[in-house]
Amino acid sequence: MIAIPKPAHRKVDIKEPINVGSKEFTNNKYEYYKRLREEAPVCKGKVSVIDAYFLSRYEDCVSFLKDPRFVRNRTTATGGGRFPIPMPKSVALMANSMITEDEPDHRRLRDLVHQAFTRGQLAKLADRIERLTHELLDQTEPQGTVDLKQAYALPIPVTVISEMVGASDEDMPRFYNGMKAMKDGLSGLNLLRTLFWDIWSFC
């Protein structure tokens, strides 16, 4: 049996802008979530070096996403390029997705992705994830002490996603390292290294 201590939470103050990549936020995120919903449902903040606004109430998020006055594609909003600064090919490929598209392209791409998440496909996926979790736990049990993140938490999404996109066995090490770089590097100043160096090296 592995005992996981509960994180210690403390009272936090909502001071704008909130940096969601800071240790202060990471160590007390659930208290921040609670206070944001109660006191600052629309809050100015930062994601690493990027300025942003955070919505923390469900109704506000739904209204925002359905309001045609707000657009995802920066070109639509500004008439310029998709990015405010030149981006390497690796970053541009990730950023050009349905998340940054407006209708009708957003709906077209969403319908394509939806085919992988039908009820039947999700049932197969659930069975695969359950088998994988048991395999990983069986592998870690004899070791006694393990790093749960590396030995259990990270291999699950890496394996499942790689199988969904059809990554070959020989590409798995690069796929794994790319996912790890994304997981570890999208906060603080590490964001710049991840976007402009780490991800590029795995493409």
Image: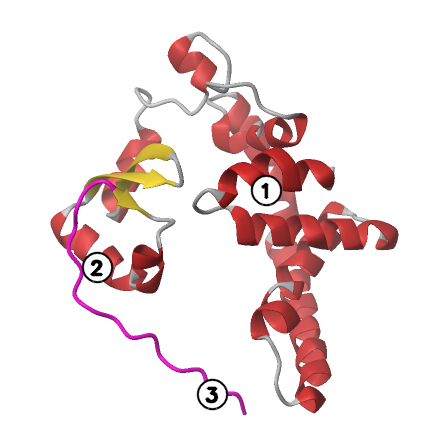
In depth, the one of 14 and 115 nearer the eye is 14
Residue visible at 50% across and 13% down in the picture: 81
* The stretch drawn in magenta includes residue 85: no
Return the x and y of residue 50 as percentages of the image width and height. 38, 33
* Cα gap from disc 3 to disc 2, whole angstroms: 26 Å
The quarter of the displayed image where residue 172 is located: bottom right
Looking at the image, is mark 1 or mark 3 nearer the viewer? 3
Q: Say whether residue 90 is visible.
A: yes
Q: Is the C-beta separation of discs 1 and 2 under 8 Å?
A: no
Return the x and y of residue 104 as percentages of the image width and height. 50, 21
Q: Say whether residue 123 is visible.
A: no
Mostly what secondary structure, the magenta segment? Answer: loop
Query: Residue under circle 3?
Result: 3
Looking at the image, is mark 1 or mark 2 nearer the viewer? 2
Task: Write down the region rendered in magenta.
Answer: 1-17
Q: Image height check: is 176 above or below 42? A: below
Label 1 sits on what residue type?
A: His
Q: Which SS class for mark 3?
A: loop
* The stretch drawn in magenta includes residue 11: yes
Label 3 sits on what residue type?
A: Ala
Return the x and y of residue 198 as percentages of the image width and height. 65, 42
Specify which label sits upstream in the sequence, 1 or 3.
3
Specify which label sits upstream in the sequence, 1 or 2.
2
**Disc on res. 100:** none
* Cα gap from disc 1 to disc 3, whole angstroms: 38 Å
Query: Residue under circle 2?
Result: 34
Query: Residue under circle 1?
Result: 114
Q: Which SS class for mark 1?
A: helix
Label 2 sits on what residue type?
A: Lys
